[in-house]
Image (tube, coloured by chain):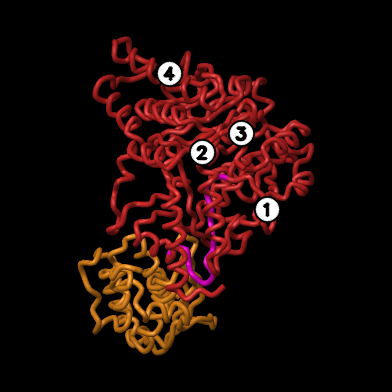
Chain colours: A orange, B red
Amino acid sequence: MSSSELQNLYQQVILDYSKNPYGVGLLGRAAGQSHQLNPTCGDEITLEVHLSGEGADRVVERIRWEGHGCAISQASASLLTELAEGLTVEDLRTRIDAFRTAMQSRGKIAPDEELLGDAVALGGVSRYVARVKCAMLGWVAAEHALVEAETR
Amino acid sequence: MTGTSETTHAPTAAEINLWREDFPLLATEVNGHPLAYLDSGATSQKPRTVLDAERHYYENLNAAVHRGAHTLAAEATVLFEDARATVADFVGAEEDELVWTSNATEALNLVAYAFSNASAGRGGAAAERFRLGAGDEIVVTEMEHHANLIPWQELAFRTGATLRYIPVGDDGALRMEAADEVITPRTRLLAFTHVSNVLGLINPVEELVARARAVGAFVVLDACQSVPHLPVDLKALDVDFAAFSGHKMLGPTGIGALYGRGELLAAMPPFLTGGSMITTVTMEAAEYLPPPQRFEAGTQKVSQAIALAAAVEYLKGIGMDRIAAHEDELGARLLAGLAEIPGVTVLGGSAPGPRVGAASFDLAGVHAHDVGQFLDDQGIAIRVGHHCAQPLHRRLGITASTRASTYLYNTTEEVDRFLEGVAATANFFGVKA
């Protein structure tokens, strides 16, 4: 019933994660936390980054989040959570930037699998301008949470 | 049940197809499918006569209105004022009771700020009746569009008045039994929507106006979703103010209107101030023109007003009673069809009518954005989100919904395509009843 573009947008991994999201449930006492809202649809996320180590060697132990939204946003936050575990803070920043670049490319830049792992499944989103915000919601929250962790 | 007479016959499929030919955009293909435009609650498509009216104005008559003595300026002014008369007559108002605004939001803000300015002492003794302060109450409803909620919140903050609201029941309808507790002698102003932009329900205007009158409160009607779809006579409805927008009734964007009862507009201080709304200006103060010019500061929306009048002529040519009868059929088909799809809950679906051709729904476990994406893939344009009515969605326990809304140019086939699309979406996401 649906076009190949649509099936490319809603890949199985996205549908799976939207039904069984990963990393849900806030733990508190995080190094940084951020709440992000998409005012056009009312979707929101609260995301924590838990870090270990010091200075330039700080490593993301885990990300935890809570929120509600569409399949794209829920899957995207799950994929981010999975990707981030064990990365240095700098490394995660690099990957958030890479993800944003791909998302804002209007389908011109395919996400880099070496940097983004399974999150490349979200590559199809960039062709749908109205949905880029959905995919970015969790990643923007992580970016802000890292800034908060740094300034605390 | 839209309040149309029993004798009104709905248009035939052949007639609707003829009307559709007047709307160039309806012939568009989207994602390889013929466009099924079911988002007229957000904005309507425009017939060629409206597009031509705006183009004709710019090609032949463009000039500043109400200033300058040259021929074009005079002709433009005549057309601009004729447009006002056409639109005013369409809603049962006198010419000088219709103020042009940029949109309905500005119209509602105009009333709120006029009350605010009166409360600050502007407008002199004549405007005392609009003064609000501590102990006064403004009443709205829980189903308002943000445009008919936030201006009143802000007015309450500025004046010290209290904002109260008539609650919505689980079925989405206004709890009229609660209205008696909310509307009291302290109520100074009652603002409510004629038709809910989410639920499509037509509110009992007569009953609400009677309650406001009983306590001496002003009545402000948000007529954005009624004027485009139903025969509306604002005088007969006996409201004090009403707002509606041009782009939802086949007109262009950038124009809306405020209706105000003549004697009230005459007593009200202005909202926006500047050129074109004054009589005498000194370095210290200014005196103002009578309405409607008092409320029309600055360069006016001339081409838009003329095009909106063309839209009104188009609507009158078909007949609002026939449009209402047609949308009544489409709305009933929408509701009946949605009720058959597993996992679908229509917001306000169990409330008794009457309603217009609009339905918002929740699909269990599937976000509205995802529903909208699937329908768009098939060329079906609908609205997703909170439809600028967050409190209503919160009251009904959801964040966002999917809305299909009809107009005169929609066909039963389009409604059926939409229903099949929703069923297919439910199937794709594995929705269970």
Nearest to N terminus: mark 4 or mark 2: 2
Q: Which mark is nearer the camera, 1 or 3?
A: 3
Q: Which residues are magenta?
A: B356-369
The residue at 29%/81% (across/down) is A116
B364 part of magenta stretch: yes
Whole-Å distance between the Cαs marked 1 and 4? 41 Å
Q: Locate residue B73: give its quadrant.
A: top left
Q: Which mark sits nearer the N-terminus, 1 or 3? A: 3
Q: Nearer the viewer, residue B364 or B64?
A: B364
Q: Give the distance between the C-alpha atoms of the residues marked 3 and 2, in whole angstroms.
A: 11 Å
Type of the residue with mark 4:
Asp
Q: In the image, residue B104 lies at what x, y percent?
A: 50, 37
**B75 to the left or right of B160:** left
Report the amino acid beneath label 2. Ala
Q: Which mark is residue B5?
A: 3
Q: Tell me the residue that label 2 is attached to.
A: B10
Mark 1 Cα shell of 10 Å, populated few (<14), some (14-19), many (≥20):
some
CA gap, disc 3 and disc 4: 30 Å
Label 1 or label 2, whichever lies nearer to me, is: 2
- Residue B233 horizontal/vertical position (percent): 59, 28
Query: What's the CA distance linking mark 1 and mark 3?
Result: 29 Å
| Residue pointed to by mark 1 | B168
SS assignment at label 4: helix
At x 29%, y 10%, the residue is B70
The chain that hosts pointer 2 is B
- Can you give x and y, in whole percent of width and height, for residue B362 in the image? 54, 63
Which is more N-terminal, label 4 or label 1?
4
Residue at left offset 45%, top offset 72%: B427
Q: Which residue is mark 4?
A: B82
Q: Chain of mark 3?
A: B
> Image quarter for residue A122?
bottom left
